[in-house]
Amino acid sequence: MAAAAFFQLMLLLPCAVLIAIPVFFYGANTTMLAWGGLGFLILAWLVQPDWRSALKTLPRDQASALYAKVDALADALQAPRVHEIALDDSINAGAFERHRGLSLRPTRRVLVLGLPLLRLLDTAAAEAVIAHELGHFSRRHGRLGHWIYRTRAAWMSWASAEGLGGHDDVESTSPWERAGRNFAAMFLPWFRRASEAHSRRCEFEADAQAARHASPAALGRALLLIERASQRQEELLAAMVRERLALDAEPPSDWVEWTPRLLAQSSVTEAEREALLRHRQPRGSHPPHAARLEALGCDASRLALTPAAFEESAAARWLSPAQWQALCREHSPWAGASQGLRWAMGHAALAGTDPAQWPVPAMAPPPRRDVASRRRRQRRLWAAGEALEHGRVRPHTLTPWQRDALVQALAANPLIGQAWAFDATLPESDGGGAMLCLVMRIDPVGLRERHLTEDDVLDQVQSTADLLWPAGMEWGARLSYLTEGLPPELQARVDATPRLKG
């Protein structure tokens, strides 16, 4: 809580100085002090660290059987009932409380269930997982966990470039922002060590609470099966998606079955079982699985780690077939206008192409860049943008296959009206070399009709780029509206360059 209060102070001190200016000039009369204090309190409430969630909640009347099961588990555990169940596309579950803290609205308990999780587990294992999450409520972990999650997220946001709107250069940030970031860089390692130790204790307590209702073996099996599915999906999902992109014009409706099929194709080896027990974050917010199973008294070698058949899964037992199909469509990773365009561009790029030409997909997320790397990356992007504005570009070096695939992808996106590709020459002070730059003019009317933004278009193009050129290849994009003109020097270059679109 002290960390949260200090974060608010860092945000509010400049505001407090502005509020104090009238007091300095007009005197500290009672009315002025009262209005200034009220304004400061309102600002303090508005800028409190928050953990916002865009999860879609499931109304009770649309899933009465699932809510009845969760309510029965809560009553058996003597835990408070949840107000809402939210669904997502992850192989995971979670529990949190909305509006806890200084909010003026009542606290609401939310249980988060991933659709792949419900498909992967049988009812016994799924009940054990839900009992674990309800254990967080019965043990009142939200009283402190609420502040931990929100404060850690707030300081991490300030410490990163993204927390300042993507600006990570001395000239683009104020001294106060840089001071806050420097403090965050020193404070976060200690705060994470202390807060994550508390989170691990909470996980052990929730495990023990769940084991009193469900069998320890069911919880242990669920933990390792979730870990196995997550690892296998991380290793192979990119390749699987790319294969389906090349075949299907529409996003797949069976996406939730992909990981269970993968796991059913092979049995667990001893080496894989040992890797699952080690877990990937031994000093993170969750304890290693080996320690959790030891506390539960489970023998990992006796646990079956194969996914449930659909008929035996929690999804089939707690939801009707029509409900399940509708939920899978609604929560698909490609649901929505922007994600649908991502799929359309990917399919147009890969359909009918030779898989031998595809670059090797990344098997894991790229490592987080340190501050120095992010600054170098940002400087090179700005240098490429400056080169574009002044026409210091040359013809792109995309291979014929990459260019043709990119042309097809851009043609599938009606939001992009015109597009060109160049290699922007970078100065030696920024590392020299060249960077691929896509110049795109987008339709503002189409954006408005689809309720999308320029960032959505960038995300769609980024998804296509991940398919067409190797991981780590440097590139940038310049977006403008069709109703806007281009700088004269850039306009001269695009007039003399064949278009990718338009």
Image: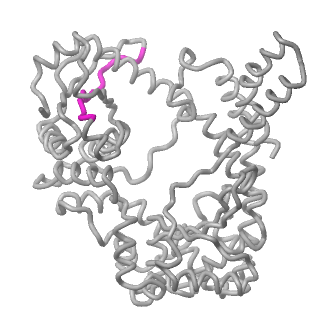
Residue 244 placement: quadrant: bottom left
Q: Main secondary structure of the magenta part?
A: strand
Residue at 22% in and 28% down:
482
Q: Nearer the viewer, residue 375 or 209?
A: 209
For residue 436, say whether it is visible: no
* Image coloring type: one colour
Residue ranking furthest to the front = 31
Q: Say whether residue 202 is visible.
A: yes
Could you tell me which quadrant the C terminus lies in? top left
Q: Give the residue at x 60% y 65%.
A: 278
Residues shaded magenta? 430-444
The x, y position of residue 480, in whole percent, is: 29, 26
The vertical placement of 370 against 15, above or below, is: below
Please state if 405 lies on the left or on the right of 476 as rendered. Answer: left
Confirm whether the magenta stretch covers residue 234: no
Residue 41 drawn at (x, y percent): 78, 36
Quarter-of-image position of residue 289: bottom right
> Would you identify the image quadrant in which residue 321 lies?
bottom left
Q: How many numbered callouts? A: 0
The vertical placement of 401 against 247, above or below, is above
> Percent from the top left, x then y, of residue 499?
12, 28
Q: Residue at x 78, y 71 (%)?
A: 139
In the rendered view, tell whether residue 332 sits above or below residue 190: below
Please tell me whether residue 440 belongs to the stretch shown in magenta.
yes
**Residue 408: % across, % down:** 13, 44
Tell whether 375 sits left or right of 392. Answer: right
The residue depicted at 66 percent of the width and 55 percent of the height is 284
Which is more toward the observer, 16 or 475?
A: 16
